[in-house]
Image: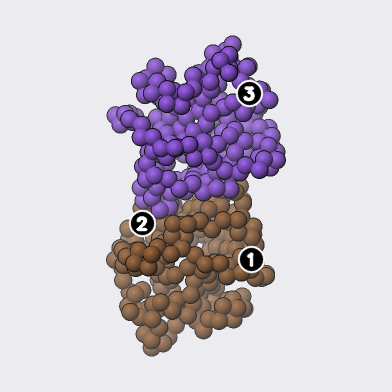
Amino acid sequence: MLLYDLISMPYKEFVPVAWQKYNESEYKGATYVGNHLFDIPYDIEYKMQYPHLYDHNGQNEDTGIKGAERSGFQQHRFSQDSDFVQEVKEYFQIDYIYCAINNLQHQMMTAMHFDLNRSALIKYTPLEKQKKILAEDKHRYIVFLQDQEMGQIFQVGEQYLSWKAGDIYSFPWYMPHCTANCSAEDRFLLSVAGFVDPDTL
Amino acid sequence: MNIIELSSMPYPEYTPYAMDRWEKEGKPSFEYHGNMKFDWPEMELPRETPFLTDHNDEPEDTGIKAADISILQQAQLPPDHEFALEMAEHFGLRYNYVALNELKTGRMMGTHVDRHRKLVFKHIPREAAEKIHMDEKQRYVVFKEDQQIGQMFQVGEEFITNWKAGDIFSFAWYVPHATANASNYDRHLVSVVGY
């Protein structure tokens, strides 16, 4: 299935498609990719985001996710021309990328959901490439930026992740996931979604 | 140390004391105790913010960050309530504190260590409590429904996974734990504590 067709669906229609794929899959977790300590620029600004309330254009969207109004986190989205994005692209060997640091503050959570990552495809991938990318070709990584504190929880499918600073996990487009921070410390991670140029595959 | 002495500590002193013990014991988590059938007593579950108040429902500074958003719906049963007695008999408890907890979707309880002072100061005669060693405490959670993706329960450094309705788990008094409900379904459990 073309990723473009998939993520053009309203979220409420996308969810049953993703559930069906998840239920058919024997794979119900995340893959450990390795460890890499990125040189994170710390002089960056964060904005509070409630991604389950809005679409990729910042317009209201009824995702049907319960608790969406409490699923908020601080986020910095890197501009495409930043040095850091180039470093991340090179590390993961991907051409088109969406890259952000998410700070889940203590006592906050992000409700269980599936990612659309519409910005990665629609905003950051050239138009002529968008309709050549298959759903399974999506690259999705999370990189934890600090050691895990007790009470910091990240669930992917049926798996609860354990992490040290720099640990990288990936999971496919149909994997439900959620996160909660029951600790007293903020939890930072690097969120990456992107694609290899389909004409080079 | 007896349970009166232990539970008399202010929470900011109690927490490091419990954490120190937990580390000395090798950071244990939970034990599985099988499965039981029970009928959930239908009743009102008032909103509680347990990290903001003491056992007399007076304001208390527990030092837990963002204690005001650790909210659950809870019915605390009198020790002679029929369901409390049923649980006490099942677990062999002379003194019980049984609560019905509902963690609504989007809610969490921050990492904490329980004191259960209502049990110690209100449900047990003082002279009996003075003879009970802190390590005699029994602490169980019994889940009402099968786990849904997004329902998380961490005990020590481990997670209770794939729980089924009626599954029983226990942990020691000094084990830190936390829970969050990022699913689309409210999560119910019976909390049983006693001696």
Q: Which of A119 and A3 is in front in this view?
A: A3
Mark 1 crowdedness (10 Å alpha carbons): few <14, some 14-19, many ≥20: many
Specify the quadrant that holds the C terminus of chain A: top right
Identified by mark 3, the residue type is Leu
Between the residue at mark 3 and the residue at mark 1, the CA separation in whole angstroms equals 43 Å
Chain A: its colour in the image is purple
- The residue that appears at 54% across and 58% down in the rendered structure is B160
Between the residue at mark 1 and the residue at mark 2, the CA separation in whole angstroms equals 31 Å
Q: Image check: B100 left or right of B119?
A: right
Q: Which of A75 and A81 is in front in this view?
A: A81
Q: Which chain carries label 2?
A: B
The image shows residue A124 at horizontal and vertical percentages of 50, 18
Mark 3 crowdedness (10 Å alpha carbons): few <14, some 14-19, many ≥20: some
The residue singled out by tag 2 in the image is B64
- Res. A114 image quadrant: top right
Q: Which of B187 and A97 is in front in this view?
A: A97
The residue singled out by tag 1 in the image is B166
- Res. A177 image quadrant: top right
The residue singled out by tag 3 in the image is A134
How many dots with numbers? Answer: 3
- Mark 1 or mark 2: name the one nearer the start of the chain: 2
- Res. A145 image quadrant: top left
Specify the quadrant that holds the N terminus of chain A: top right
Identified by mark 1, the residue type is Gly
The image shows residue A17 at horizontal and vertical percentages of 69, 34
